[in-house]
Image (cartoon, rainbow, N blue to C red):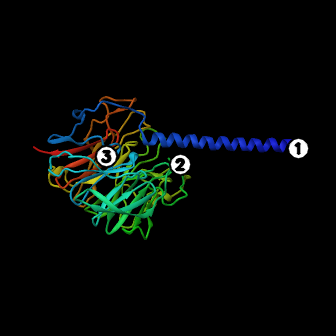
Amino acid sequence: MAQRGTILKRIGIIFLSFIAVLSCVIAYLAYTTFANFARAEKTHFDLAQLKAPPGFHISVFAEEVDGARMMAFSPGGALLVSESGEGKVVALPDPKHAGKAERTVDVLSGLNEPHGLAFYEGKLYVAENDKVRRYDWDEANLRTSNPRALADLPAGGGHSTRSLVFNGGKMYVSAGSSCNVCIEKDPRRAAVMEFAPDGSDRKIFAKGLRNAVGLAVNPKTDTVWVTVNGRDWLGDDLPPEVIVDLGKDGGDAGWPYCYGDRVPDSKFTKPGDNRCKNVIAPKVQMQAHSAPLGLAFYEGSEFPPEYRNNIFVAFHGSWNRSVPTGYKIVRVKLDDKGQPQGDAEDFITGWLAPGETKKGRWMGRPVGIVFGSDGAMYVSDDAGGVIYRVTYAK
């Protein structure tokens, strides 16, 4: 009888363990499925639905760019776009400066979720889910050669996009968390890493960044600024999405122990815990669940003075809010020292269906923002497969 009881006890333990593992798997699948794709219905494409301030004009630069994510201009002015879901990087040349891509050229294929793109010293750098690779670039033929793997990145799991930017002779690469909110075992996750351009000398430059997707250099502060997507399941309005200045030395932005402007997360802190007082404070706080992705600093002169020296941010849009939010481009004004003045303001709206409440019907989802040498803004839309061109004329 004692032996039978022991066997039944072991069976019970195995069964409970199985249930626990199964629950984790289901939760993980639900999270990774819905965190990347809005539970919404796509509407008919209508460019006239997009609204910008008076004088700004929105046109379609390229279509059928499946899952268009991040962008970069080649040294010769061709726009490159990552198609993460397709495993591709494409070029959209406009050699006649007609304001519309002449054709679509497959530059790379068979990649592992390519996302961040950058040119540095004439070479193309591509951040995939698990690595960064560098290529020699042939501008005349829009081709790459001599691929070289430079750095291994934490692969798979949760937030899978990897972004990169160069500043001060260093390469900065972000990797999001493997979860909604947890204590990571791999220090490379929920972090921005710093490398030499050849992939050596890796170090964790900044940590506690749940999912830093947009990376850009503030020309006034000469530091890397990032958009950070906050955790889910704290209601419609918490935590705020933030923009963080990583500064000259990086540091700790607090996640998972803190969110927003150094607010302790009760799941990971106890009353009286002071760890959040010393983490990096955000420069900008924005509406929760907006999903800020790409950001860019405008340094041109083609836009009116009030739009110069602004940060522009692409809101991909909410997936777990009772009333949808995001699905737009916003701007934040900066002073002459590169510091924010006021809150984010709408710049381009209309990707979310007019008057939409709970169903969440959308026409597109903005991702990346870059500015061309022509002074125009280019916006990628991974749901519509469109690249938009935004210009100004009186």
Instruction: Please tell me whether mark 3 sits on a helix, a strand or a loop.
Output: strand
Front: mark 2 or 3: 3
**Which corner quadrant of the image does residue 321 belong to?**
top left
**Cβ–Cβ below 8 Å for labels 1 and 2?**
no
Front: mark 1 or 2: 1
Instruction: Please tell me whether mark 2 sits on a helix, a strand or a loop.
Output: loop
Residue 151 pos. (x, y %): 43, 64
The quadrant in which the N terminus is found is top right
Return the residue at label 2: 266
Q: Label 3 sits on what residue type? A: Ala
**Cβ–Cβ below 8 Å for labels 1 and 3?**
no
First-in-chain label (1 vs 3): 1
What is the tally of numbered marks visible in this picture? 3
Q: Nearer the viewer, residue 97 or 189?
A: 97
Residue at image location 43% in from the left, 45% down from the top: 239
Checking the image for residue 2, the label placed there is 1
First-in-chain label (1 vs 2): 1
Q: Nearer the viewer, residue 357 or 279?
A: 357
143 in relation to 203, above or below: above
Q: Residues within 10 Å of mark 1 (few under 14, many from 20)?
A: few
**Cβ–Cβ below 8 Å for labels 2 and 3?**
no
Residue 279 pos. (x, y %): 44, 59
| Residue farthest to the left, as pictured | 394
Q: Nearer the viewer, residue 65 or 262?
A: 65
C-alpha distance separating marks 1 and 3: 65 Å
373 in relation to 360, above or below: below
C-alpha distance separating marks 2 and 3: 30 Å
Q: Label 2 sits on what residue type? A: Ser
Residue at image location 15% in from the left, 54% down from the top: 301
Left or right position of 126 against 20: left
Q: Nearer the viewer, residue 355 or 236?
A: 355
Return the residue at label 3: 314
